[in-house]
Amino acid sequence: MVPFLRGEGITKLDGFMVSHNDFDHSGGMASVLALMPVRWLASSFSTKIEAPETHNKISCFAGQVWLWDSVKFEVLHPAMDSYADEKITDNNRSCVLKVTSQAGSILLTGDIEKEAELALLNSVSEQLKSDVLTVPHHGSKTSSIDDFIAAVSPNVSIFTTGYLNRFGHPKPLIVERYQSFGSIMYRSDYDGALVIDYVNNLSNKNKIMLSSWRAQHPHYWQDTYVSELGAME
């Protein structure tokens, strides 16, 4: 993360949100905090978990709202009183953040599962609609219930999955579910890093431009090899 941020000319972070304490979400946190000034860190970490030292550590909770450069940020989950309930899993206490600009919106869901999806439907269903969705829990079968997908109604759905990951994410059933809603799908294991630009141009034609790092910077070993035996990747 730090080389990417420095490559973009970013030398400090006003805010830093980590959805929850699973290593595939928080693993790079210590490096970022050690190598860049960070004004505040928001997370859903249990009080028993020590996050790296930072100027201001806060818990994410539904109802937090702020505005930066006409871009609105809204924390939709978890509820503040959920921190007192030890039965709630780290996944279902993931910070869920909606970001809205004049050109479009994105819903970042962490690893929430169906219990948290139902809680969101019961509390803020009208706020879920988003142009882009990071698919909950990498496309696990424990997430992405029909009513949740319908409420978000994403034009684009992004599966953040590791190549040949041991969990088999995303599950074919879940992929088919998003296909049935007509959402355009991207996968980090196939497409690499994804860059999303929300464009609000002078002609007032708002649009979202999404580019795949792997498509923009291809390597020969990622091409399709064709032999007499058929195609191989």
Image (spheres, rainbow, N blue to C red):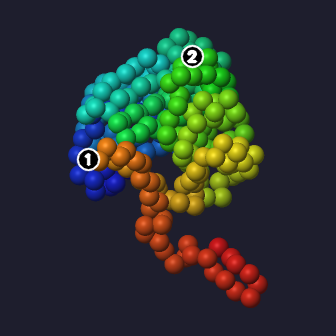
Name above or below for residue 134 compared with residue 85.
below
Q: Position of residue 27 (x, y in %)?
A: 47, 43
Amino acid, disc 2? Ser
The quarter of the picture where the C terminus appears is bottom right
Q: Position of residue 175 (x, y in %)?
A: 69, 48
Name above or below for residue 70 compared with residue 2.
above
In the image shown, does 149 or 118 lie closer to the viewer? 149
Q: Position of residue 206 (x, y in %)?
A: 37, 44
Q: Using the image, tell me which numbered label, if any, was put on residue 202.
A: 1
Image point (50%, 29%), residue name? 96
Q: Is 223 on the left-hand or right-hand side of 75?
A: right
Q: Is 224 on the left-hand or right-hand side of 48?
A: right
In the image shown, does 66 or 10 lie closer to the viewer? 66
Q: Residues within 10 Å of mark 1 (few under 14, many from 20)?
A: few
Image point (67%, 29%), residue name? 147
Residue labelled with disc 2: 123
Q: Quadrant of residue 146?
A: top right
Label 2 residue SS: helix
Q: Is 151 on the left-hand or right-hand side of 200?
A: right
Separation (CA) of disc 2 from disc 1: 37 Å
Residue 23 shows in this picture = no
Image point (44%, 62%), residue name? 213
Amino acid, disc 1? Leu
